[in-house]
Amino acid sequence: MRRSAPDHIPFHLQQQAHQLIESASSGEMDEISGEAVFGLSKAAQNVRQAALNKYLRTGLMIGVIRHEILAFEKIFDRPVFLEIVRAWIQDQDGNIRISERTMRSYITNIAILAEWLHLDTSFMRASLKINPTLKKGQRDAQEMSEPAKAFCQHLLRNRRAELTFQSLHLAFMRDAQSLRAEVFNSPYKERRIIQLGVLACFSAIALWGVPLRVSNMLQLRHRGEDANLILPVGARRQAYVLLPAHSVKNKRDIKASLVDGPTRALEVLIWYLDEIRPEIHGSEESDFLFPGYGGGQLSSTVLRGWLHRHARNHHLQMFPHNFRHGLASLYLRAQPGDYAGAARLLCNTPNVVRKYYAWIDEERELLEVQDKIIKMAGFSK
């Protein structure tokens, strides 16, 4: 497989990709209101952006897309598409390959973007119907992934893991405080304190406020005209997360609170704002709760790496989306069959929740049947 280096996307391709995503996701113009309607949420646009970025980077790496290409629509030509998808399927070293379910999702979004440009996508649609790998991706998308399921099973079967998960915000805060109290100083020490502080605040909101998707969590602003995290004022010891439907993948308004109490979640949020966030470079110019470089929001890839690295110190193998999976699993164990309640927790629909979490009820029902068989045989547990 021929590769080119570096694999970054040239600026002129980035610009055209951004314009295409924006145009294809803005919806239709309602002449009465003068506003665009039926547009994609920011989270859904991010999925399309990720799909197109992966497609472009792969094409550049294997040489089927040239850095100097000017006709953007040529990236969707049949030979280019086929070589890129072959690379995704065949690559074994981890530099290109992605999971079957992600691959199918990305190809579906690539086809939508190509169709918006009025290009032929019959070969893309045919691949989704015929290719065994992509058909497996469709089956996988109908249920929880095996790594996510293994994480949830670990929480449900291990009381210590469950308690650790539910108190991660406190564990990360203590880790940061302990590190700060150590006498040695180094640039890495300060970076690690910031990482732990960010993770403590992120965990506090995800566990005891609302388990937002990572894209929505990183869009939280605690100040400015577009503030969507409303901080406590005066005697009101409560913070609010307020997200309009258009910014949420499932097009549902989100209003959740973070209250003062035994979880100490609000305490962690205030501690982060007072002691950690001011240490982040460029934080004064940013309204984002979790600022990144250049005044923008923190990268989801960076956050993912931090969480995976530091959660391992507490014997948990997890990524940001595991907050959603873990909380929903624990809720459904306590409230069997209450998919409507779990759907409210996840800001999703009961049908979607049932599709991903039905295995919890199935495992519980199997245990109940096994107990009955043991009793029928005259044994006592």
Image (tube, helix red, strand yellow):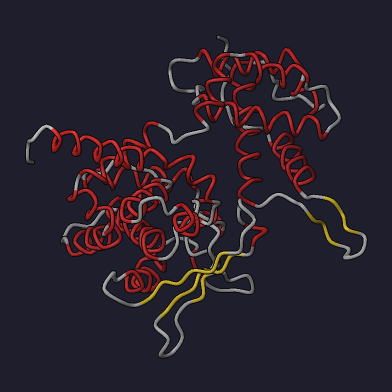
- Between 164 and 173, the residue placed more toward the observer is 164
**Looking at the image, which residue is at 22% across and 48% down?**
161
Residue 109 drawn at (x, y percent): 68, 33
Q: Is residue 304 left or right of residue 254?
A: left
Q: Which quarter of the rendering shows the N terminus?
A: top right
Residue 358 sits in which quadrant? Answer: top left
- Between 229 and 275, the residue placed more toward the observer is 229
Against 239, is 317 above or below?
above
Residue 170 drawn at (x, y percent): 26, 63
Residue 188 drawn at (x, y percent): 30, 50
Number of marks in the rendered image: 0
Q: Which quarter of the rendering shows the C terminus?
A: top left
Residue 116 drawn at (x, y percent): 82, 35
Q: Is residue 107 left or right of residue 176?
A: right
Residue 305 sits in which quadrant? Answer: top left
Q: Residue furthest bottom?
A: 235
**Looking at the image, which residue is at 70% across and 20% down?**
66
Q: Residue furthest right?
A: 31
- Between 354 and 19, the residue placed more toward the observer is 354
